[in-house]
Amino acid sequence: MKTALKSILLPAVVLACTLFQACGAGPDSVYSTRAAEDIGKAVTEAKAGNKRVLVDVGSKGCIWCVRLHSFITDDPELSQLAARSFVTVRVDYRANAALLNGYGRVEGTPHFFVLDNDGKLLRSQDTAELEAGKSYDRAKVLAFFKTWGN
């Protein structure tokens, strides 16, 4: 009986977890649809903390967005530098295209916009320039954070 139950439950659990991620609960679902509000809050927080705002533009289902997020969060030096230098806002491009295109043309996702703590655009960065093979070039990402961070 226990073996039969396991043979039914295990595939059901695996399927549920897969659907859970596919329906938006995975790591690529954290892109905000409320860019104006969230960027406004980030600017306020950046001003208080003497930081800059990193607007990480992406979209659900974007494999390069997931790769970049993991690349940064899995590297202690990169993640600490980003946290010290920026207030990061992850924004869904599809839901906020008109607002985001006001900062500059977004050729693809992921894309970075760096704002000062008054909300003024300092840098528009096509992250394809930071890629290396099927990942990212650590030296380039580190240099970007050091150059554009506060």
Image: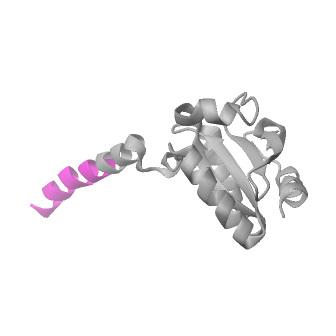
- Which quadrant is home to the C terminus? bottom right
x then y, percent, for residue 34: 51, 45
Magenta-drawn stretch contains 5: yes
In this view of the protein, which residue sits in the foreground, 126 or 137? 126
- Which quadrant is home to the N terminus? bottom left
Q: Quadrant of residue 112?
A: top right
x then y, percent, for residue 133: 78, 39
Q: Does residue 108 appear to the left or right of 35 in the view shown?
A: right
Q: Quadrant of residue 72?
A: bottom right
Residue 15 vs 128, above or below: the answer is below
Observer able to see residue 46: yes
Q: Residue at x 66, y 36 (%)?
A: 100
Q: Residue at x 55, y 31 (%)?
A: 94
Q: Does residue 50 appear to the left or right of 8 in the view shown?
A: right
Magenta part of the chain: 1-14
Q: Residue at x 72, y 53 (%)?
A: 54
Q: Does residue 45 appear to the left or right of 141 in the view shown?
A: left
Q: Residue at x 55, y 50 (%)?
A: 37
Q: Quadrant of residue 2?
A: bottom left
Q: Identify the image's colour scheme: rainbow, by chain, secondary structure or one colour.
A: one colour
Q: Does residue 12 appear to the left or right of 123 in the view shown?
A: left
Observer able to see residue 83: no
In this view of the protein, which residue sits in the foreground, 26 or 95? 95
x then y, percent, for residue 7: 21, 52
Chief SS of the magenta region: helix
x then y, percent, for residue 41: 60, 59
Name the outermost residue toward the left. 1
In this view of the protein, which residue sits in the foreground, 24 or 116? 116
Residue 111 vs 11, above or below: the answer is above
